[in-house]
Amino acid sequence: MNRLWTAWRNYWFRPGPVIDLAIARIAAVGFQLLNFFFWARPSDDFVSFSEQPHLYNPLALLRLVFRPISPDWFPTIGTMEGIYAATVLFGILALVGLATNISLLFFALGSAVLQAHAYSFNEFHHPEAILAFMLAFLALSPSGRALSVDRLILRLRDTIRVRRFTPSRPLEETSDAARWPVLALIWMFSLIYASAGFYKLKAAGLDWLNGYTLRYFLLQDGLRWDIPFSIGPAQHQVFALAMSYGSLLFELTFFLTILFPVLVPVYAVLGVLAHIGIWELMRAGFWEFLVLYLALVPWTRVLSAARQALEPAAARRRMEMIYDGECFLCLRSMAVIDSLDWLDLVRPSAFQNEGVKERCAKLGITPLDTRRELHLILPDQTIYRGFFAFRRLAWMVPALLPFAPLMYLPGAAWAGPRVYRIIASSRRRFETCENDACRI
């Protein structure tokens, strides 16, 4: 019994990379927010739903949520608009990773309530369910341990606590709870596809494999949605037979990814191609499935391989940031820059380190200069100081690009250095110092 429990625990809770989970969080939450804003805005339906109380048959989730009022209470437009606004707010917080788990929990709940409200008027679509479950899984996982504001805040606290800046290595960070949400997603995919396959056999039996059934649906959807691309293939029996056998085989064997994880990339590629084909031929969108397939990508391996392949070129492009290792504000600044430097373009160097002083002396940078402002040294030995160092950095680091235009506005070159100087001269307000660095 202990052996079975150990095997079960090792299956779900082996250490896994947290950055994979963080990317899954960003993909799932980002898609749902885009869905709310552009493609299927829940608020567009609130008025029409309010005019059809005779169709309202609340699902179990709504009965539970509204039980304090009444299990069968008919929610007003104002109530649903409030839930919608709160859900979007928590979604934005979950996307950037601020109070990640709590934000994700309320975002998942709000998304489920909004979807259940739509379903309570006899309007059912099944792709949304798997996304709702995945959001709940992410809320119970360490998905905020990377690529998040929470992570940045933790880095800032640790940097000040130890009074030393250490570059982060997010690709190497793991957690015992980072793997189970992805495994649960694979199980859900397996159950969904298996149920779809068995339903085909139950509804049509072996007639599903004769090709004519699929040709009928292709012609029906091709004429309904005016898709010439689907009408052509519907006239070829060989194509219809291949697609009929292929779809059923894919659905009934997807569970093999549970037994043989090495098959996950293969079935993920097949699944993506299948859903793209379904959209092109039948205009049936399974966008939630396509987005969640991103969670099955081993991003840590992909990014590690890309970094190794680009290492020689990246080394030639790396910029050196000279900072005062005894200044708390400088340490915090480096922690922020390091958190945003996803491509590892910046090499931080504390002036107090061996060899850095000598290198700076050759470039005409004095100890007093480093204590007054940060220095950015490009590979061609061009030097940028203070505000201009940050402006150049914003132009070079992709994560900072949205802020770069603001630093090039008219008057920025005059106001920027002055604002930088005021902040630098007030560094003692950020932390009490016990050395002479903060007196400069």
Image (cartoon, grey):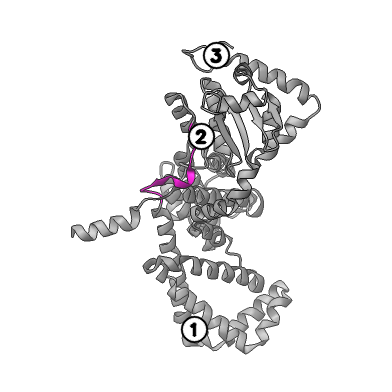
Q: Determine the secondary structure under disc 3.
A: helix
Q: Which mark is residue 119?
A: none
- Residue, far right: 410
- Type of amino acid under label 3: Cys
- Type of amino acid under label 1: Ala
What residue is shown with label 1?
204
Of the pair 55 and 169, the residue shown nearer to us:
169
In space, the residues marked 1 and 3 are separated at their CA atoms by 78 Å
The residues colored magenta run 166-178
Q: Is residue 436 above or below residue 120?
A: above
N-term mark: 1 or 3:
1
In space, the residues marked 1 and 2 are separated at their CA atoms by 55 Å
Does the CB distance between marks 3 and 2 fall below 8 Å?
Answer: no
What residue is shown with label 2?
152
Residue in the image at 61% along x and 71% along y: 278
What residue is shown with label 3?
438
In this rendering, would 191 be left or right of 74?
Answer: left
Mark 1 or 3, closer to the camera: 3
Mark 1 or 2, closer to the camera: 2
- Please provide percent x and percent y for residue 400: 65, 37
Mark 3 or 2, closer to the camera: 3
In this rendering, would 335 be left or right of 44?
Answer: left
Q: Is residue 257 above or below residue 165?
A: below
N-term mark: 1 or 2:
2
In this rendering, would 246 be left or right of 319?
Answer: left
Magenta stretch encompasses residue 168: yes
Most common SS among magenta residues: loop
- Please provide percent x and percent y for residue 138: 45, 49
- Type of amino acid under label 2: Leu
